Amino acid sequence: MDTSKVSGVSGPLAMEVDALSVVYQRSIKALQGVSLAVPQGEVVAILGANGAGKTTFLRTISGLLGFHGGAITSGSYRLWGRSAEKLAPQSIVRRGVSQVMEGRRIMAQMTVEENLDLGAISVRSRRETAERKHQLLEQFPWLGERRHSVAGYLSGGEQQMLAIARALMSNPRFIILDEPSLGLAPIIARQIAGIIAEIAADGTTVLLVEQNAAMALSLCSYAYVFQTGKVAKQGTAEDLLDDQYIQELYLGLAGAEAT
Ligand code: ATP
């Protein structure tokens, strides 16, 4: 099992990224020397404004970079201690990693249940798929109530919950969530946060990419702040919540102490 070279991290790592650099179209630098560790069983967050490189990072670790005209130029990426930077997307899923893409990407014309079945494509046995679906329908009762509803008619929050449940169908050890609160009302975003906390409490490792820093820092133990393709800051959630730079840029608390 991998143990980290990244400072402050001990114990087994689900993911370790070491000095990763990525370009698009051979020359556009999107990530420069990004190092990051996700300890097994923890929630780690990546924060950053538009264009900071968060999506590029997720494309890289999901094996999807090539489809977007990007390539790794240096650095390494390991999942549970084994090299992963050359893996195809389906091999990464087979290693136990499941990603909830930004914008939910559910199949709008299919039913809730059909969407869940799609999440089990990498699961070989039908019995396992049926068992997993049963578990999820119990965990999220509203899914059971709407199992025959057309997904496109669900509210934004329900679609996000469906996208998360679909990602859980493959019974991942590690789930990656790309901006799960995007476009949702604060009260719905809090419900999504509750679901993420539940997933983590079950022992699943979580990597959460968010522009909503308040939500991310309420859930994670450690966070990385991306800026123009680099890690500009990192620290425990506690430290970052106290950090003036984070407060001003990401938590909307500029000048808070003056009032
Ligand atoms: P957002 O939240 O807006 O998605 P982000 O933090 O995810 O932002 P990226 O989308 O990773 O940032 O973008 C990082 C940089 O890479 C930006 O300068 C962007 O213009 C560039 N970029 C992203 N995708 C491509 C692409 N397919 N081809 C060329 N450049 C790209």
Image (tube, rainbow, N blue to C red):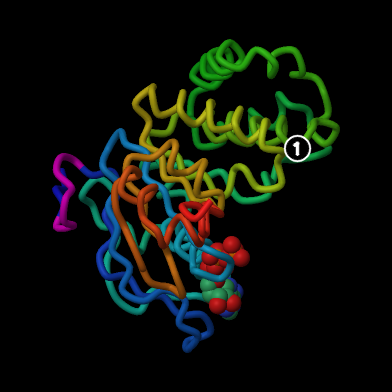
Left or right: 220 with respect to 1? right
Closest to the observer: 47 or 113?
Answer: 47
Query: Would you say residue 6 sits in the magenta stretch?
Result: yes
Q: In which quarter of the image is ligand 1?
A: bottom right
| Residue 67 visible at all | no
| Residue 213 visible at all | yes
Q: Which residue is drawn at 71% across and 33% down?
A: 157
Q: Residue at x 55, y 35 (%)?
A: 167
Amino acid type shown at disc 1 = Gly
Left or right: 144 with respect to 242? right
The residue segment tinted magenta is 5-12
Dividing the picture into quarters, in which one does residue 95 lie? top left
Q: Where is residue 144 in the image (x, y as percent from the top left)?
A: 69, 14
| Secondary element at image label 1 | helix
Q: Where is residue 93 in the image (x, y as percent from the top left)?
A: 44, 44
Left or right: 146 with respect to 177? right
Quadrant of the snapshot with the N terminus: top left
Residue placed under numbered mark 1 in the picture: 156
From this view, report whether residue 249 is shown above or below residue 82: below
Q: Residue at x 33, y 68 (%)?
A: 34
Label 1: how many residues lie within 10 Å, few (<14), some (14-19) or many (20+)? some
Query: Would you say residue 90 sits in the magenta stretch?
Result: no
Q: Position of residue 245 (x, y in %)?
A: 41, 62
From this view, report whether residue 198 is shown above or below residue 85: above
Overall secondary structure of the magenta stretch? Answer: loop
From this view, report whether residue 87 is shown above or below residue 110: below
Dividing the picture into quarters, in which one does residue 150 lie? top right
Closest to the observer: 51 or 141?
Answer: 51
Q: Where is residue 240 in the image (x, y as percent from the top left)?
A: 36, 51
From this view, report whether residue 90 is shown above or below residue 172: below
Q: Residue at x 37, y 45 (%)?
A: 44
